[in-house]
Image (tube, helix red, strand yellow):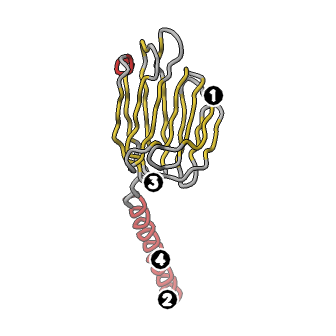
């Protein structure tokens, strides 16, 4: 009888241990499944400018704020009846809307960039021409530089400033189709 009693005691202990493991495992699984996810670290905001707005040599001023490093995706699908686009996208700072950076699309494969120190009047720091593919250009602004990327890229060593506005204008293009899409994240 003692052997049977001992086996029942061990069996009960094993059964209790197994139930405890299953319950704790279930609680952990429920916690993992229901744990609140952390909020996204960045938010993308978008702005679209149709070709009709740029056809009449007007300005489009988009008031948008970025107070930390940000990336701008420019997607230019505008078409012109003749010549170059001269579609100009200029970022302005919270410091009296001073010039920060600019991209001028000459066409779908070629653009001009320029960067400035963040002071009134926008003393130009550096500029040049780069290639892009189908009008796609990324402008990445961090604490110490602005990086322009198409199919080639360039890094301008300038100090970060807070973004307050992106201005789009027709420098001399005869637009007849497409749009400019601007995404900031």
> CA–CA distance between discs 3 and 2?
77 Å
Q: Which mark is residue 1?
A: 2
Lower sequence index among marks 3 and 4: 4
Lower sequence index among marks 1 and 3: 3
Lower sequence index among marks 4 and 1: 4
Which element is circle 1 on? strand
Mark nearest the camera among 2 and 1 is 1
In this figure, which residue is indicated by the disc labeled 3? 68
Labelled pair 1, 3 in contact (Cβ < 8 Å): no
Pointer 2: residues within 10 angstroms few (<14), some, or many (20+)? few
> CA–CA distance between discs 1 and 3?
27 Å
The residue depicted at 46 percent of the width and 75 percent of the height is 15
Residue 151's image quarter? top right
Find residue 48 and report its horizontal and vertical position in percent: 37, 29
Instruction: Pick whichever, 25 or 144, lies toward us.
Output: 144
Which element is circle 3 on? loop
Which element is circle 2 on? loop
> CA–CA distance between discs 3 and 4?
53 Å
Residue 185 visible in the current orientation: no
> CA–CA distance between discs 4 and 2?
24 Å
In the figure, 147 relative to 27: above or below?
A: above
Lower sequence index among marks 2 and 1: 2
Labelled pair 4, 2 in contact (Cβ < 8 Å): no
In this figure, which residue is indicated by the disc labeled 4? 17
Find residue 55 and report its horizontal and vertical position in percent: 38, 16
């Amino acid at each position: 009888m003692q052997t049977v009693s001992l086996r029942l005691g061990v069996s009960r202990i094993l059964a209790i241990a197994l139930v405890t493991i299953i319950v704790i495992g279930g609680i952990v699984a429920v916690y993992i499944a229901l744990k609140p996810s952390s909020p996204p670290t960045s938010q993308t905001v978008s702005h679209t400018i149709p070709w009709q707005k740029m056809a009449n040599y007007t300005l489009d001023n988009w008031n948008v704020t970025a107070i930390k490093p940000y990336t701008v995706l420019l997607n230019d699908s505008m078409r012109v009846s003749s010549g170059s686009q001269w579609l100009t996208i200029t970022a302005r700072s919270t410091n009296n809307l001073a010039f920060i950076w600019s991209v001028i699309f000459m066409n779908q494969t070629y653009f001009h960039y320029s960067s400035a120190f963040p002071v009134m009047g926008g003393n130009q720091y550096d500029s040049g021409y780069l290639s892009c593919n189908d009008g796609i250009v990324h402008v990445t602004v961090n604490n110490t530089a602005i990086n322009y990327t198409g199919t080639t890229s360039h890094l301008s060593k300038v100090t970060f400033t807070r973004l307050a506005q992106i201005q789009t204008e027709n420098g001399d293009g005869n637009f007849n189709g497409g749009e400019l899409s601007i995404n900031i994240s």
